[in-house]
Image: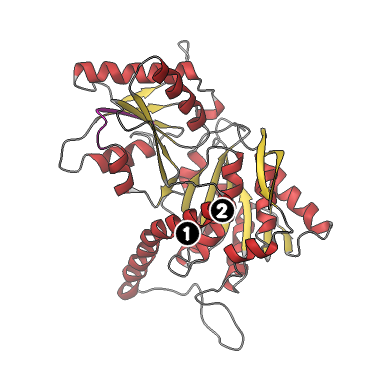
Amino acid sequence: MTKVLGMMGDFAVAEAAKLCNPDVVAAFPITPQTIIVERLSEFVADGELDCEYITVESEHSAMSACYGASSTGARVYTATASQGVALMCEILYLVASARFPVVMTVVNRALSGPISIWCDHNDAMLARDSGWIQWFVEDCQEAYDSTIQAFKVGEDRRVSLPVMVCLDGFILSHSIEPVAIIEPTDKKTIDGFLPRRDPLYRLDVDAPIAVGTCAFPEYYMDIKKAQNEAMRNAKNVMKDVVEEFGDRWGRYYPIVESYHMDDAEVALVTMGSLTGTAKATVDEMREEGERVGLVKLRCFRPFPIEEMRIALREVQACGVVDRAVSFGSYGPAFSETSSTMNTGREGPLFRNFIAGLGGRDVTIADFKKMYEILYDDLKKGVVEQPITWYGIRKEV
């Protein structure tokens, strides 16, 4: 059974995390994530959630607590944002390398400096090669559903990796949207979808093992190869989980979503909440007779190479919108997408739009201008300056 409630994205995530019945929650406040762990503390205090709720002194400590708890076979959850990701970065690598399926919500916020509490994706991109699965959600409903799916994917024995669910700070975390939540009384259904964790291994006094040991050169590379294979396996597991979740509750989230791409001449690739505005732009331009399309990239790690090739195979010009910057290079999503499409064969013209950093708004009018730029590239047959910082103030 489900019911629809109006709630902020942070509340929706907390509700989903509670439903998954974690054994341990490591909590530290940081804007705009704080509401999630505050809400979980209320659930614990009210007896709605039976877990070990650990208040820690920093994000580094939060992820360290997650590492220790997950090593015992516990189901573990935490949440953070921005500088919190930066501070816990050392331990992110340890959790992934130990194959501990911790689930963490990252409420995306720009990294300092200068200080900004508003949204962009540089915090998640800081950790894109740490070994964590990374999903970016479009709306509050997807944030709720993805939190539940994340535990099932990460804890699958074919994967056994941590999962990062990313939602845009303030734009989603503090916006109220209708969210269909699964009733707590529907325990049989949720338990059928998400049974208790069955770890590959765990710390046990009756069957002792060593965790976090030194790997000499004879072994290190083999361990990394196994970790990479687990990440590759995750893609097919995600597809299975998405299908099962959709069959139970009627909501499907492909790792790559094509929107009006069947006859599109030009297309944009987006991640996160920008996708909703971009879809509205496509609808308006389609009514005006323009053959434009959109590809929503939900899963950034593992990067869905084959699925992106299929989604963009017929398009003639493509703009990848990055809400992040890799200084001295292209945006992260652009680099991944363009390299995927141009591997020794002809592909579409590519342009990188850097937009929305530090919470700057990106409107329907802005997306229309991006499509116009792509059509101009198509007419010229070449992209003369492949990086466009869209929306820069003239006086800066």
Q: Which residue is mark 2?
A: 88
Amino acid at dot 1: Tyr
Q: Residue furthest top?
A: 395
Q: Are marks 2 and 1 in contact (CB under 8 Å)?
A: no
Total tally of numbered discs in the picture: 2
Amino acid at dot 2: Met
| 105 is higher (above) or lower (below) than 193 | above
Residue at 59%, 58% (x, y): give it.
Answer: 63
- Mark yes or no: residue 30 visible: no
Q: Which residue is mark 1?
A: 93
Question: Residue 319's spot in the image, x, y percent?
Answer: 34, 28
Q: How is the image coloured?
A: secondary structure
Question: Residue 262's spot in the image, x, y percent?
Answer: 31, 33
Question: Residue 303's spot in the image, x, y percent?
Answer: 37, 49
136 or 79, which lies in front?
A: 136
The stretch drawn in magenta includes residue 315: yes
Q: Residue furthest right?
A: 46
Q: Earlier in the sequence, mark 2 or mark 1?
A: 2
| 300 is higher (above) or lower (below) than 22 | above
| 282 is higher (above) or lower (below) than 182 | above
Residue 158 in which image quadrant:
bottom left
Helix, strand or loop at mark 1: helix
The stretch drawn in magenta includes residue 186: no
- Mark yes or no: residue 277 visible: yes
Q: For the magenta stretch, what is the residue range?
A: 313-320
Helix, strand or loop at mark 2: loop
Q: Residue furthest bottom?
A: 206
**Circle number at residue 104:** none
CA neighbours of label 2 inside 10 A, class few (<14), some (14 to 19), many (20+): some
Q: Is residue 154 left or right of residue 383?
A: right
Question: Residue 175's spot in the image, x, y percent?
Answer: 66, 32
Q: CA distance from mark 2 to mark 1?
A: 9 Å
